[in-house]
Amino acid sequence: QGDAAAIRRLVLETDAPMVVDADALTCFAQEPESLRARPHLVLTPHPGEASRLLACDPQRVELDRFAAAEGLANSTGQVVVLKGAYSIVASPGQSPRVCPFGSSALATAGSGDVLTGLIAALLVHLSPLEAATTGVIVHALAGEQMTADRGVLASEIADAIPVVMQELHAAAT
């Protein structure tokens, strides 16, 4: 209980842009609307975490991932990355964005932590929506570089991120 209160205070009373993931999201399950008071957040739930924030069954989230992502973005006033196959990035009042990239490598333990770290790093220079969208795409492309004939470590996905970013930069120039 004390840890949850400390996390809630940290998230709500810190002015810096921030990614809220995993157990930190669960700390807001009873009052997700309290996040409206805080600008510059990116929430990164998987369907189970999203269902707790939306007070619904996880199957409902999976049945209409667009509605779940949009509903969570609108209720919290924050950018939301609903993780999963074809992750969805939603922002209040805007059409959701779907990542067309990815692979089963992204289902490995720790992959979500890599995504969270990438989005957090991008928040230094980008808006929450741009950081979330860019992070999801780069993370998915890094996953696509992994071979499917063996298990993948999250650190391998992280190691592929600079390569993907360099390739994207080269293609843009």
Image (tube, helix red, strand yellow):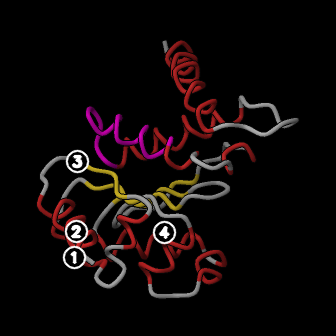
Name which residue type carries label 3: Pro
Can you tell which of label 1 and label 2 is closer to the viewer? 2
Quote the CA–CA distance across marks 2 and 4.
22 Å
Q: How many other residues sit within 10 Å of disc 2, few (<14), some (14-19) or many (≥20)?
A: some
Q: Mark 2 points at which residue?
A: 8
Can you tell which of label 4 and label 3 is closer to the viewer? 3
Mark sitting earlier along the chain (2/4): 2
Say which element carries label 4.
helix
Look at the magenta stretch and give its main secondary structure: helix
Name which residue type carries label 2: Arg
Q: Mark 3 points at which residue?
A: 17
Q: Which residue lies furthest to the front in this view?
A: 2
Can you tell which of label 2 and label 4 is closer to the viewer? 2
| Residue 120 percent location from the top left of the image | 35, 41
Q: Which residue is drawn at 55% across and 69% down?
A: 66
User: In front: 43, or 155?
Assistant: 155
| Residue 67 percent location from the top left of the image | 52, 75
Mark sitting earlier along the chain (2/3): 2
**Quarter-of-image position of residue 54:** bottom left
Q: Name the residue under label 1.
A: 34
Say which element carries label 2.
helix
